[in-house]
Amino acid sequence: MVNLIQLVHPSFSEEIMPTMDTFLKVTEQLQKQKPNCCYFFNTSFGLEYSAIGLWEEEKFQGSIFVGPFLSNAPNLDFINRVISSNQLPLHSRKTLQDFYDSLIVVHPHELNHLNVLLTNLFSHPYVAPQLRSSDSLPSFSTKHEVLSKQEPTQQTIEARYKFENELMSVVAKGDGLLAIKIMDEHLELIDFSYRASDNPIRAYKNLLFSLNTLNRKAAEKGGVHPIYLHSISEKFAIMIERTKDLPTLYEIRRALLMEYSESVRTYSNPEYSDIVKRAIHYILLHIDYPLTLEEIAKKIYVNPAHLSRKFKSETHMTLTQYIHYKKIEEAKPYLEKGSLSITEIALLVGFNDSNYFGKVFKKVTGMTPSLFIANTNK
C-alpha cells in the first residue's frame, strides 16, 4: 500500500463525493506502481477509499475503487473537523451526520482483509477453472451448533430488570466507563441466544438493538434533546445491522454506551427548567444564525419577558450573553485553524458585522480575535 494522500474538496453539496479528476489522479498513481499495489486514500470530508489497478500481461488496463467507507464511527468531533476543514456552515451538522450514518464502518483489520482480497482478485493472471463432477457428494452440516439456553427463571427476570434500571441510571448521569463495567459484569442477564440459537450473530444484534433503545431512553431521561438522540440511535442501528462478525459487535456495544453517556455530558442541562432547556437547545441548533430573545421565545412558545427572567435566574447570564458566549466558543476552533479570515468566521457563527463580532469576542475572552490568533500561533 502506498502512502496516504489527502484530497481537499471545495464545498459541501451533492459533490461531497470525489470528482472524476480525483479518481483519474489515483489511477495515474496506480499505473506507476507494481501490479500488487493497493492504494488507500481519504478526502477532507473523511471519506475513505481503497483502489487496485487492473493488469493484463503486465499492461495497465484501469482501476477499481471500493468506497466510500469510514474507519471509525463518526462522532461530534469528527463532524466539527469536517465542517472546519471544508469551511461549511454550522447548520450542515445534521445533514452531514445523516450522510455519515449511512456509510459502512470498516475497521483496520477488515480493511487489511479487503486489500488482500482486491490484490489477489485483480493482480494475478486469469486461470481457467477445471470442472469435475461426481455422482455423490459428501454431506456437510452448515448449521452453526450452539447450546440453547433454558427459558429465564423468575429470579433471572427480576435481576434483569434491576440491572437495566441500574444501567439506565448510570447512562443518564453520563458515566460511560461505569456503564461499561456494569454491562460487562451482567452479560449473562441479557443473553437471549436461545431466541436464535442457530444464529449467534443475529441474536447479538437483537441484544444491541434493545440496548440502543434502552440507552436512548436513558439519555433522554438525563436531559438530552431527542434531535441529538435520533442521530445517535440511527447511526448505531445502521452499524449494528451492517456488521457481520461478533468481535465488531462487541466493540459497538462499548461504543454505544460511551456515546450515549457522552451525549448526556455534552447536551443535558439537568439543573435547568424545561423552558430554559428548550431555549438552550434552540440556540445550539441555530448558533450560526443571528438570534434574538423575541425569535427564540416565539419558537418555543413562551412569553419573551418570562423567558428572559427565567433564563437569567437559572443560568446567571442574560440570554444575549449566553448566545454570545456560545458563538465565540464556536468561533475559536476556526480562528485557531487559521484557514478563514476573521470576517468569514464572523459570518459563519451568525454575526453580520465583523466589527461587532470583534467587540463581542473581546468582551467574552478579554482579547481581540487578532490577539487570540497571535497567542495560538506562539
Image (cartoon, grey):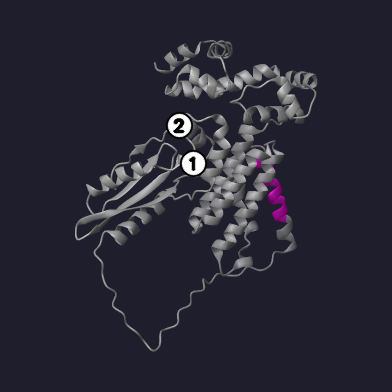
State left or right for residue 18 relative to residue 155: left
- Compared to residue 69, the image places residue 7 above or below, namely above
User: Which residue is more in the foreground, 160 or 5?
Assistant: 5
Looking at the picture, how far across and down is residue 193, in whole percent? 60, 64
The label shown at residue 86 is: 2
Q: Residue at x 49, y 14 (%)?
A: 369
Q: Is residue 370 visible?
A: yes
* Residue labelled with disc 1: 14
Residue displayed at 73% across by 21% down: 294
Query: Residue at position x 49%, y 17% from top?
Result: 343
- Label annotation for residue 169: none
Number of numbered discs on residues = 2
In the image, 288: left or right of 268?
Answer: left
Residue at 70% over, 59% down? 156
Secondary structure mainly formed by the magenta segment? helix
Quadrant including the C terminus: top left
Residue 220's image quarter? Answer: top right
Q: Residue furthest bottom?
A: 135
Highlighted range, magenta = 159-171
Residue type at mark 1: give it. Answer: Glu
> Along the line of sight, which residue is nearer the eye, 53 or 116?
53
- Residue 197, compared with residue 260, is above or below; it is below
Does residue 1 belong to the magenta stretch?
no
Residue 159: where, in percent of width, then height? 71, 55
Labels 2, 1: front one = 1
Residue 256 locus on image (x, y percent):
57, 46
